[in-house]
Image: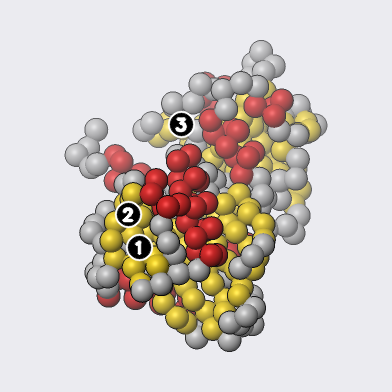
Amino acid sequence: MTDLDPRALRTAFGRFMTGVTVVTTRASDGTLCGFTANSFSSVSLDPPLLLVCPGKFLSTFQSFAGCSRFAVNVLAEGQEDVSNTFASFKGDRFAQVPHTLDAHGIPLINEAIAQFSCATWQSLPAGDHQILIGEVTEFTQSESPGLGYAGGQYFSLGLERAVLDQTFDKTVCGAIIARDDTVFLEETPNGFRPPQIDLKDRGRLRLDLHEALLLRGCDLDLGAAYSVYDDAGSRTHHAYFLATSTGAPGTGMQAVPARDLPSLTYTTPAIAEMMARYSIEARSRSFGLYLGDAKRGDVHSLTERT
C-alpha cells in the first residue's frame, strides 16, 4: 500500500465524468451475476475489444475473473434504479430488473442504450481489481441519451440541457452548498436564499456561478442541477445546483443545519419549497432534479451513489 490517501484518491478519480454500465455474466453453476461499473472503456476496433474492471470486493468476483463470456449494458437516462440495484441490492438483482438473454445465455438489460455481448479475450490481475478484456461478438444501440456519473452523483445531459433551453429575459443561478450536515445560506431583508447571481449569458452559467462564489471566499465543488424553474411573472429563469464545500461559508453566508431548513423564512415560496425538499432528500442522499415553473413541475431522480 502506498502512502496516498485512498479516500482522496477515489475522490480524484471521481472527477472524471463517465457513463454508467451494468456488467453481466453467468456463473459456472448457471447463476446470473451482475454489477454496476463506470470502469468501462473501448479498446480496439480491429479486433473489436472493450474492457471492464471488476473489483475483488465483489461477491461474484471469481465468476467474472474466470468467465468465458460476459456482457456490458450502457444505461440510459432514467435508469438510476437499475444502477442502484446492481450496485447495492443484496437479493436477486435480476428479479428486480427487466432483462433478456443473449444467444449465449448472458443477461442483457432492457432499455440500455447499448448492449455488448463479449467473449473473454484476456483476464489480467491489476491490484485490487481485474482487467477483463472482451471481444465484442454482437451489439445493439439506440439514440437515447445515456446516464452519467461524476463526483459521486448521477447526471443526465438531457435534463441538464433543460437548464439552458429557456428564453426568459433574466437568469438567476445559485448553489445549495452543503458542508457536513449544514447548508450555506445568505440572509436578505426578505428572508434566506441560497447564494446566487444574476446572469445574461447562459452559455457560461456554471462557470460564472463557480467563479462568483470563489470570489466570495467559498471554496466549493459544483455538482448536478437540482432545481430549474421559470417565473412567468418576472420573466426570470432560475437554476440551482447542488454543491459541496469543506471550508468556511463565503462572504455574506452562514451555515444552517439542514434539519432547520423547513422552518426558515425565504425570499420566495419557490425557494422555500426547494429548501424543504432538500432537507428531506439530504437525509437519504437521494436527490431529484425539479423541472417546471415556480408553482408546479416534476422531480426527476438523480440519486447519489456511494
Residue positioned 44% across, 64% down in the render: 266
On residue 55, the disc is: 3
User: How much space separates mark 2 and mark 1, taking CA atoms?
Assistant: 7 Å
Instruction: Kindly identify the amino acid type of the residue bearing the numbered disc 1.
Output: Leu
Mark nearer the N terminus (2 vs 1): 1
Q: Residue 13 location in percent, x, y? A: 38, 49
Residue positioned 42% across, 52% down in the render: 263
Q: State the SS at label 2.
A: strand
On residue 256, the disc is: 2
Q: Residue 154 location in percent, x, y? A: 53, 51
User: How much space separates mark 3 and mark 1, taking CA atoms?
Assistant: 40 Å
Q: State the SS at label 3.
A: loop
Mark nearer the N terminus (3 vs 1): 3
For label 1, count other residues whose C-alpha is less than 10 Å away and answer few (under 14), some (14-19) or many (20+).
Answer: many
Work out which residue is located at the far top of the displayed protein and give it. Answer: 29
Q: Are circles 2 and 1 on residues that touch, CB within 8 Å? A: yes
Q: Residue 6 location in percent, x, y? A: 29, 39
Q: Are circles 3 and 2 on residues that touch, CB within 8 Å? A: no
Q: State the SS at label 1.
A: strand
Q: Mark 1 points at which residue?
A: 185
